[in-house]
Image (tube, rainbow, N blue to C red):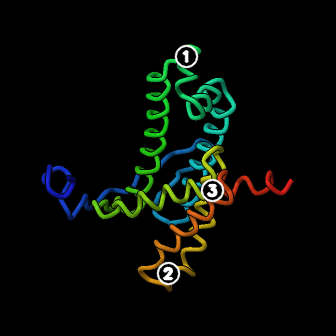
Amino acid sequence: ILGNFWIPILGGYRGLLGIPRPAPISIPGLGKLEFESEVTYYYIVLLVVIITILVLYRLERSRFGLVFNAIRDADILAESVGINLMKYKLLCFVVGGFFAGVAGSLFAHYQRIITPYDFDVHSGILMIIYVVVGGMTTVFGPMIGTTILRLLGHPLRQFGMYETMLLGILLILILLFLPGGLISIPERIT
């Protein structure tokens, strides 16, 4: 769709080219923050990740988190006790969309080019595998899954087109033997 429609606006298959670097930010007492080096981007992304983790961790521990867990576990039961499913599912979608937008903005300004190939089906499937392997029930599970599978990606790359199949086999094994993901290993040990 992005490749064939709105070509004057979105650039078609060439994508959006020449995305500018963010304007410098003046921080009182610290000076001016320029976005010319990868080190600056690293620290900005690290700061955004820490803030995101804190917000999501706090959200998970709040009343909203309890409602989200109830909807995840048994949505019909949650609705029967008075939880407005549409309201909370929409809120969950908005929160997820907000953080995806922040990440996409950081990605776009770092790469300075966005094409439809950056967001293909393969990338979406890999993200789902990262989340399931790490564990879907906590904030830290997807981070663990992503870190471990990205580290495994380099040795698996030697298998070429079988890399995705091996990740699929790993996903099936995790679902069979660790349904809670890698984050549940300490709990299983105890």
Q: Position of residue 117 (x, y in %)?
A: 30, 64
N-term mark: 1 or 3:
1
Which mark, by number, is residue 80? 1
Q: Is residue 15 left or right of residue 187?
A: left
Which mark, by number, is residue 157? 2
For the view shown, which residue lies furthest in the top direction? 82
- Identify the residue under disc 3: 134
Disc 3 residue crowd, few under 14, some 14–19, many 20+, Cα 10 Å: many
Q: CA distance from mark 1 to mark 3?
A: 31 Å
Which mark, by number, is residue 187? none
Give the residue displayed 53% in from the left and 51% down from the top. Answer: 32
- SS label for mark 3: helix
Which mark is nearer the camera, 1 or 2?
Answer: 1
Q: Position of residue 182 (x, y in %)?
A: 68, 58
Amino acid, disc 3:
Gly
Asked if 187 appears above or below 154 in the picture, the reply is above
Q: Position of residue 116 (x, y in %)?
A: 28, 60
Which mark is nearer the camera, 1 or 3?
Answer: 1
Q: Are marks 1 and 2 in contact (CB under 8 Å)?
A: no
Amino acid, disc 1:
Ser
N-term mark: 2 or 3:
3
